[in-house]
Amino acid sequence: MKTLYRYISTELLKLVAISFFLFLFVILVDRASTIAETVLGQGVSFGEFLSVLVKGLPAFFGIVIPISFVISTLILFIQMENNNELVALKACGVSIKQISVPVFVMGTLFSLFSFYSLMFLAPKSNVAMKKELQELLKKKITMSISPKTFSSNFPGVTFYVEKVFPQKGFIENFMVSLQKKSELLTIFGKKGVLRTTGDTVFLDIYDGSAQLINWKKPEEFKFLKFQDYTVELYRFSNKEKFSAEKYKTLFQLLKEGDIESKTELLKRLCLSLSPLIVGILAFSVAVSLPRGSLGFGITIGLLTVVIYYVIYTIAKKTAVKAGIPAIALTPDVLFGTIAVIAYHMAAKEKLSLYTGSRW
């Protein structure tokens, strides 16, 4: 029996590894295109772009692991059925329950890894990626400015620029408006250089003019012309507060204790249990399909994953709106019930799925 368990575990692990990197690659390509639109072409090197991308990858482990395990379980046991391996095992007196032991063990291990990823790796990954983007923004401050568009990426600062030269940090024919308390400073310039010194963003202006108005004393309106002038635009905070739930680890969520934090905690717990729950359902379906049903089995697997995530998304939003965090566990309760019923029927060989394939 140990040989059987080792064989199933090894084959399942191989398929999970292949599926994991395949789905991670798909997500990586989609993520890369989104980030590339923001940073590439703004004076950011490919190495810096790759660094942002790599730091953001662990945030997706909790999602990719369940998908990989479900699809791999379906593929493995449908292939074993096609190769008459399941028939041979049953003929030797090995039951479905005995065959399923490696699935339970592997499902539990992947659920634990998913739990760790969602509770610790993902929040740290989100924080690391945001910090990396902030550092890039400090180095290449022109990332926040789009030509011929009003840009307001800093509090109280609005830009309108005709031309932007990201590689050198130059801007030409621009207007910048700075609102500070009761004062409004509007500057027009032909050429400017954006630079960051420490945590402060400066704008060096050449050949420009400025209008300063104090709303409390409008009669003291001032108009200035100058050849060169430097203005402080923004000061980055040294103590960044990551207040959103996605940045918080397990212990931080437990410490908060509000509705949003409880919902986020149960939402992650729900997703972390999905490899075991949906994996058992996938096993039950796989051993009940007739030979030649690999394509149908994979389709069922993908459809199951899609339905799970649709319910998962609806449940977490409903939980927050209703103020009942436990609603976030709905997908696992629903699929767990179906998995238990399907497993018992498969173990008694009472679950038969007809796909039109030949035996």
Image: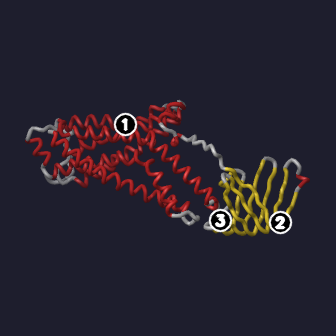
Could you tell me which residue is drawn at 16 percent across and 43 percent down?
4
Could you tell me which residue is drawn at 11 percent across and 41 percent down?
90
Task: Identify the mark nearer the N-term, 2 or 3.
Answer: 3
**Of tags 1 and 3, which is closer to the observer?**
3
State the quadrant of the N terminus: top left
- Badge 1 vs badge 3, beta-carbon distance below 8 Å: no
Instruction: Give the residue type at disc 2.
Output: Phe
x, y (%) of residue 124? 49, 44
Give the spatial CA distance, label 2 vs label 3: 21 Å
- Badge 2 vs badge 3, beta-carbon distance below 8 Å: no
Give the spatial CA distance, label 2 vs label 1: 67 Å
x, y (%) of residue 41? 56, 66
Residue 230, compared with residue 117, is above or below; it is below
Q: Nearer the viewer, residue 346 or 128?
A: 128
The local secondary structure at tag 1 comes to: helix
The local secondary structure at tag 2 comes to: strand
Q: Residue under circle 1? A: 332
Residue 197, compared with residue 93, is above or below; it is below
**Of tags 2 and 1, which is closer to the observer?**
2
x, y (%) of residue 180? 77, 49
Q: Nearer the viewer, residue 82 or 32?
A: 32
Q: Residues within 10 Å of mark 3 (few under 14, many from 20)?
A: some
**64 left or right of 100 in image:** right
Task: Identify the mark nearer the N-term, 2 or 1.
Answer: 2
Task: Identify the mark nearer the N-term, 1 or 3.
Answer: 3
Q: Residue under circle 3? A: 169
Could you tell me which residue is drawn at 14 percent across and 45 percent down?
86
**234 left or right of 46 in image:** right
Instruction: Give the residue type at disc 3.
Output: Gly
Q: Residue under circle 2? A: 226
Instruction: Give the residue type at disc 1.
Output: Asp
